[in-house]
Image (spheres, grey):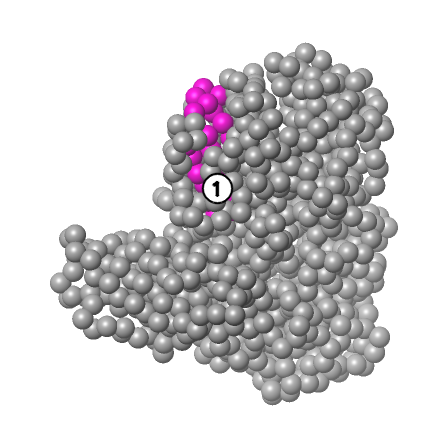
Amino acid sequence: MRLILSLFLVLILFGAGFSLAKEYSDFATPSELIIKKQIFPNSWQKLNGPFGGQGYTIRFDPSNSKKIIVTDSFVGIHISEDGGLTWKESNTGIDARTGGSGDSIPVFVVTIDPNNTQRFWCGVKNAMGVFLSQDGGMTWEHKDNGLPNGSEVEIRGLAVKPGDSNTIFAAGDLEEIGPFTGAFQRTEGIVYRTIDGGENWEKVLEGGNLFKDIIIDPNSPNTIYVASGFFDRHELENLEGVHKSTDGGNTWQKINSGIRNLYVTTIKFDPTNSNTIWGTTGMIPQFADSRETEDGGIIKSIDGGMTWAEIKRGRNSSGTQLYSALGISETDPNVIYASGFGLFTQSSDGGKTWIETGFGPRGTNAGHPIDIAVDPNDPNTVYVDSYVGGVFKSTDEGKTWVTNAFGYSGSEVSHVTVAPDNKKIFATSRTGIFLSEDKGINWTPVGIGDVGFDELFAVTPHPTDSNILLLGDGLNALGSIFRSIDGGMTWKTVFMLLQEHSPFVDATDITGPIAFTEIKFAKSNPNVVFAASVKHSLEHLQVDSIGHGLFKSIDAGKTWVKKNSGLTGFMNTWDVAIDPNDENIVYTVTNDSGIYKSTDGGENFTRLLNGLEDKTSFYSISINPTNSQIILAGSQDGEILRSLDAGNSWAKVLDFRNFDNINDIEFNPQNPNQAFAGATATGFYVSNDSGATWEQFNDGLTGRKIEDISVPQDGSAVYLTAYGGGVFRLPLVGGSLILTRQQVEIPSNAGIDGIDNALSDNDTDNPSEDDPNDTDQNNDLPFEVSGSALNGIIFGKKPSKNLLLIELIENSGVDQMKIKLSSNLPSQVLKIAPIEFSLNSTRNSKQVKLITKPAKKLIKTFGANLPSTLVLNIEGIVEGNTITSEVEIPISVEN
């Protein structure tokens, strides 16, 4: 249940493998902890998804265009022999391991020897490692003598010299060592060279920022280029741009003439002319500094990098855009694809004009593109390897996307739950929310509505009404709860902790995201719901912010109030449990002040101490479903504690290692004596005596960093999420499932910035709940504007999303109208999405997002003359005639 907080819309933690609780990297093997007995007749089975992964590079085998090789910094290398339909793991011999449980196979990059396509090279992160395969990726061997060792080493780029398989270049970085501030270490760049096939390496270049892409001129093999910069890493010393060597790597020079943004994220040769080089630039907006490095572009050189021109800057709409991936068709070099978060763009005329679309299937967050590869035989077919999203394929130039997790999922799944009817399974991850209706074999993204690109955590079905579900996020720093009344197909925001004029605005001066870690319905009265939340600062591995604690709803999740009386410390509540027979008895656990209990429905909490005097850090708590006197709690110190008297006293029943967090504990509803626990470093445990004794069972688990556990009401199986490994299933009744391939195909893509994930009348016939903020702006107009944003928008320390609904009025006499939006604020301080759309009799409404940038940008733009009102200009075009309206929205600024 303990989630991994990574930031996407506020912070995108690329490559960090980062968690709120302290990770334990010096992990223990199972034999060091407990002797495992074969207590189940079946093993764990990895299911087909949900899709996702920390994708990094994608390569075609030059001798076989159906063979595709991808890398993932959680699950290593996977190879497809059928154009991406199915995948097989290819990690034999790659012994580099990272992560809290020591299971992650952290491969960053793979490259194929142009002189021998059976020879593959790969580089790993946070572990000493360059590896060579001489059998097409089937087996691997170490080749890293002379490379720096240590966990700070990351190899991000590899290139083999044409005509000389013994000469290889490795580019990468050394991460900052020791205490640091901010979301990431700063990095310095390194380039190493071997001239004896990897037996020995020597450093040939170092720089003030990491090096990533390294390419060798096929027509002049002593000419090498290396790009410096990655979109979520700051430089240790200075920006480097692009370096070039013309003597085989002995000497280097910077070649940055014409490059405006020196965060150069990609460089690639034109397939027909190696003097022509394409590249991309930019950085995540939340990490950008005074150099305005977030404003990326697509760059091109036609003279071997000596001068550069910016072919495309930002977006066609004049907004800024980070670009992080680029691909060029071999059969038609005029066809170029480029992408960054929320946008995919294509040119068919050599970069003169660009068509912009969204990236990834509808209803999902497809992540951040890292690499693009165009089918060697078809310029319309393009593959993208995406950080967070994994591998995607389009056969129509990026207009629509498909993905397939058959054999490959590195998804960072936070939560899994089975609906009470045992028919639907929901899972949340960094790629969104997914639904399976075949016991977890296949998954479909269902993030339609207000969810957008939010990364999601707690998801909970109503115990008696399978149409109602609640969903929590936190990574956009707004702390939202979403509600579905159609079985999870569409979602509406019912609570946003840090929205405009919120009574819950943070009073502390520590920034960071808020996450809803768990949401629980009371079984005795499902109108009562509790939500646990945590707040995280930007310091790595620290939950050191004063949080918001618990929230309660008495109307099945429609409205929420805070319930924290008696809670002390940071009030970061990781889990909540409600007595199955009495909704007034509530327990919650914190990671700094222990376990609390309320007997009056959350009005007052008392800390439980008997047996817990020296225990303060807990992540999970669970109540026996038939005997509420029995309670189990899991701690950060690798302990499970049990109470037999409703929390009055506690005794330790399992103790193995510090910092092996017990992230979740669940009872079997059909066999209440059976309980299951999942840990950060050592995997899965089972008890058959209500928690008195425990045994470990990891057979079949390829990842032991357990985040969440769910048991169906029929007790037929156990589902768990292994961070960076997707969802696993252990059958308790019957055998393993027969996995069938199902390609996930959505009719349209998510749209630019995911705007087509927004809810429309075509998505649901369910009536919307009453909105007290709905206002008819002008009864003479054929459209009306409503939504909470009309009350005002706030420019604060963090971006804020504000919602409006523009709706065509029924019986207005207008059947179709085109809408164009603009405002008195420039795009660098306020983003409107979408700015153009059409309404008609079948699609008669559109949700509009007003996204405010941080207040510092507003102040920088306007100085002392800050605007007090946002004037939203709405232009409606009907049969060639234009109708205009202005909506004034109050502005407030929080410094």
Q: Position of residue 410 (x, y in %)?
A: 61, 43
Q: Quadrant of residue 106?
A: top right
Q: Is residue 823 left or right of residue 225?
A: left
- Residue tagged by mark 1? 313
Badge 1 marks a residue whose secondary structure is strand
Residue 504's place in the image compared with 196, above or below, is below
Q: Is residue 812 left or right of residue 455?
A: left
Q: Amino acid at mark 1?
A: Arg
Which of the pair 171/580 is nearer the observer? Answer: 171
Q: Position of residue 505 (x, y in %)?
A: 56, 76
Q: Quadrant of the C terminus?
A: bottom right
Extent of the magenta region: 326-347
Residue 400's place in the image compared with 668, above or below, is above
Q: Quadrant of the N terminus?
A: bottom right
Which of the pair 96/848 is nearer the observer? Answer: 848
Q: Quadrant of residue 598?
A: bottom right
- Kindly identify the residue that appears in the image at 85 percent across and 29 percent down: 146
Residue 619's place in the image compared with 368, above or below, is below
Kindly give the residue lying farthest to the left in the view shown.
813
